[in-house]
Image (tube, grey):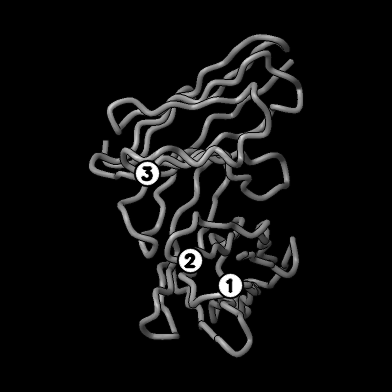
């Protein structure tokens, strides 16, 4: 069975600092991986996805994520945090035939 | 519109009443999902429709919950005899067929049970 673990329910970084949100997955077959962002009172928006092409995936708003099979990880990064990045971030995994499974989310706080 | 539309955006009702939540997916999307998001929690899968196949109902928490999808498009999630623990945001998402396709989410219905 597949699963997703997001380390840290809350992460705080200073404006301009590196953002690193951690995601580890469990899957018996090569998965498809997604990062979504949720702003207050809104649904989830796709940030980026990994679908077995390049292991370094670039998304919207300057975010990127690297698929590391040996570590079963798909961590989300952004070189320089902006106040507008404050939101909740969800990592998700999906095998070819299964429904998508979401992590419990990480709330990102940006300190001025 | 171009996105997934959910209605109502907010619903307040008394314990014991039935509620219906509506989802209009993106035109042409064959897959439709319902999730529940409680305060401070992740997304809890409820039900999944894919084309004309039988829906995956494995996430429905009790027999008070049901959903249908008419004509492969609009979906309605019904909660009967609502309880206070049903208070949550109910999110709908749709996608084209294929596991590599991302889901597109509506803004959700915030349900409050008094």
Q: As rendered, which of B108 and A34 lies closer to the eye?
A: A34
In the displayed structure image, the side of residue A45 where residue B101 appears, left or right: left
**Mark 3 — on which chain does it sit?**
B
Q: CA distance from mark 3 to mark 2?
A: 15 Å
Q: Position of residue A53 (x, y in %)?
A: 36, 82
In the displayed structure image, the side of residue A85 where residue B30 appears, left or right: left
Dot 1 lies on which element? loop
- Which numbered marker is on residue A27? 1
Mark 3 Cα shell of 10 Å, populated few (<14), some (14-19), many (≥20): some
Dot 3 lies on which element? strand
Can marks 3 and 1 be said to lie on one chain? Answer: no
Quadrant where the C terminus of chain A lies? bottom right
Residue A70 occupies quadrant = bottom right
Q: Position of residue B74 (x, y in %)?
A: 34, 28
- Which numbered marker is on residue A95? 2
Q: CA distance from mark 1 to mark 2?
A: 8 Å
- The residue at the far left in this view is B28
The answer to whether residue A68 shows anywhere in this view is yes
**Mark 1 — on which chain does it sit?**
A
Dot 2 lies on which element? loop
Q: Which residue is label 3 attached to?
A: B50
**Mark 2 — on which chain does it sit?**
A
Q: Position of residue A93 (x, y in %)?
A: 53, 65
The residue at 39%/49% (across/down) is B104
- CB atoms of marks 1 and 2 within 8 Å: yes
- CB atoms of marks 3 and 2 within 8 Å: no
The residue at 54%/81% (across/down) is A79
């Amino acid at each position: 069975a597949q699963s997703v673990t997001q380390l840290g329910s809350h992460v705080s970084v200073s404006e301009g600092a590196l953002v690193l949100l951690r995601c580890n997955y469990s899957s018996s077959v090569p998965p498809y991986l997604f990062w979504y962002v949720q702003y207050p009172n809104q649904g989830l928006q796709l940030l980026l996805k990994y679908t077995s092409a390049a292991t370094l995936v670039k998304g919207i708003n300057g975010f990127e994520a690297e698929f590391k099979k040996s570590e079963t990880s798909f961590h989300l990064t952004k070189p320089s945090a902006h106040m507008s990045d404050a939101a909740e971030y969800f990592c998700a995994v999906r095998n070819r035939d299964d429904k998508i499974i979401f992590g419990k989310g990480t709330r990102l706080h940006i300190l001025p | 519109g171009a996105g997934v539309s959910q209605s109502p955006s907010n619903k307040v009702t008394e314990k014991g009443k039935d509620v219906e939540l509506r989802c209009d997916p993106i035109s042409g999307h064959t897959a439709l999902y319902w999730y529940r998001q409680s305060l401070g929690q992740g997304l809890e899968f409820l039900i999944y429709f894919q084309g004309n196949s039988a829906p995956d109902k494995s996430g429905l928490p009790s027999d008070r919950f049901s959903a249908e999808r008419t004509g492969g498009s609009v979906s309605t999630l019904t909660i009967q005899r609502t309880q206070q623990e049903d208070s949550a945001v109910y999110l709908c998402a749709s996608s084209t067929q294929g596991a590599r396709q991302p889901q597109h989410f509506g803004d959700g219905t915030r349900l409050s049970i008094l």
